[in-house]
Image (spheres, rainbow, N blue to C red):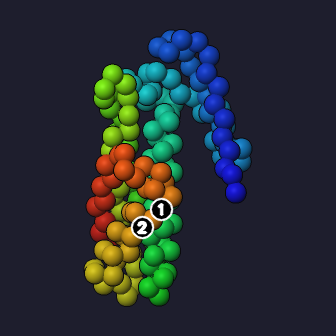
Amino acid sequence: MASKASAVWTGSLKEGKGTMSTATGVLKNANYSFATRFEGAETGTTPEEMIAAAHASCFSMALGAQLGGSGLTPEKIETQAAVTLAKVDGGFKVTRIALTTTASVPGATKEVFDKAAAEAKTGCPISKLFANNTEITLDAKLV
């Protein structure tokens, strides 16, 4: 399966603007710009925000799968991802992704949950994409 998205950019880096869309239409002509990406403007999105959404959802699914492999069914898994874009060596790089998750899992022990969370962190495809070049941290709590 290949997931598809597109982006259009017009103008120079600082004064230009762009839109991004997904083939499914879930995201349609979402605005992004230099100001949203590097200056903290609140209207529009960034490529890093899309990575954060992808990683949070990927990790949540992977954790559900890991727990399922232990015979457990989570009631709810909530994950936030914070993607850090930093200037390094004269350019920019995603240097860190911090995952924070809470999960309600009837019958789970802390040990089983912690093991499942660690395996989900290394096993989800988005984590694998960033492995060996980006620090990925995890704060996982069983509630």
Tell whether label 2 touches label 1 (CB within 8 Å): yes
Q: Is residue 100 above or below residue 19?
A: below
In the rendered structure, find residue 31 and report the number of the disc placed on it.
Answer: none
Question: Which quarter of the figure has residue 77?
Answer: bottom left
Question: Which quarter of the figure has residue 108?
Answer: bottom left
Element type at marker 1? Answer: loop
Q: Is residue 70 left or right of residue 25?
A: left
User: In this figure, what is the number of numbered marks?
Assistant: 2
Q: Position of residue 59 (x, y in %)?
A: 45, 61
The quadrant of the image that shows the N terminus is bottom right
In the rendered structure, find residue 120 and report the number of the disc placed on it.
Answer: 2
Viewer-side residue, 34 vs 94: 94
Query: What's the distance in space between the residues labelled 1 and 2, CA to CA?
Result: 6 Å
Q: Badge 1, how many Cα within 10 Å: few under 14, some, many 20+? A: some
Give the residue type at disc 1.
Cys
Q: Residue at the spot x=28%, y=80% of the render?
A: 110
Q: Which residue is mark 1?
A: 124
The quadrant of the image that shows the C terminus is bottom left
